[in-house]
Amino acid sequence: MKIYVIDNGGQWTHREWRVLKYLGVNVEIKGNESNVEELSDADGLVLSGGAPSIAYESFRLGKTSDYLSRMDIPILGICAGAQFMGMFYGGRVEPAVHPEFGKVKIRINNRDALLKDIPPEFIAWESHNDEIKALPDGFELLASSDTCKIQVFSNEKMGRFGIQFHPEVEHTEFGEKIFRNFLDLCAP
């Protein structure tokens, strides 16, 4: 299995790579200016978090819109990657009323394959100023926190999954399981 982590300038991009490598995946980090053709052997993509404000600087996510529109493989967006995904498909991203940094309790509202075998509540690690305020049509809200309604969302039919928190950091409970579930969705 081949997974590319698209680097959007996130502080934890290498952790995403490391978790996937630890899980036995053939994984590479690629810049967000990479052409779709360079990623044609991918079974899945992870859109990393990053420093840009998606509400104001989405252009800094390079060719991410090409990946979302032209690649028919599962794509997991994390933090800014999830925000961009939500906005790309017609959702709304704005500065958070309560930016989240550090520990937060996540509550699962609905389940899909990404959250398979995850307890109904768990602790996750946050680092964001912007958040998705409205989901695009066809996407389902899966999990929330007290101050951020849209923590996890998906359109399983399209193979698009978004997570506001950071499953790649060790402070997030069940983060490795979330990545395993994503890899199951990517299995050829």
Image (cartoon, helix red, strand yellow):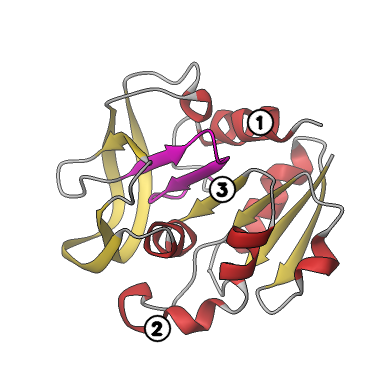
> Who comes first in sequence, dot 3 or dot 2?
2
Q: Are marks 1 and 3 in contact (CB under 8 Å)?
A: no
Residue bearing mark 3: 76
Mark 1 Cα-neighbour bin, 10 Å: few <14, some 14–19, many ≥20: some
Residue bearing mark 2: 57
Q: Which residues are magenta?
A: 151-168
Q: Are marks 3 and 2 in contact (CB under 8 Å)?
A: no
Nearer to me, 181 or 171 = 181
> Who comes first in sequence, dot 1 or dot 3?
3
In the depicted structure, whether residue 116 falls above or below residue 127: above
Q: Amino acid at mark 2?
A: Glu
Residue 3 position, x and y percent, is: 76, 49
Residue in the picture at 69% in, 45% down: 73
Q: Amino acid at mark 1?
A: Leu
Nearer to me, 143 or 38 = 38
Q: Amino acid at mark 3?
A: Leu
- Quote the CA–CA distance across marks 1 and 3: 10 Å
Q: Quadrant of the N terminus?
A: top right
- Quote the CA–CA distance across marks 1 and 2: 30 Å
Residue bearing mark 1: 185
In-image side of 84 versus 46 (left or right): left
> Who comes first in sequence, dot 1 or dot 2?
2
Residue 156 belongs to magenta span: yes
Residue 18 position, x and y percent, is: 71, 50
Mark 2 Cα-neighbour bin, 10 Å: few <14, some 14–19, many ≥20: few
Residue 34 position, x and y percent, is: 75, 75
Q: Dot 1: what SS?
A: helix
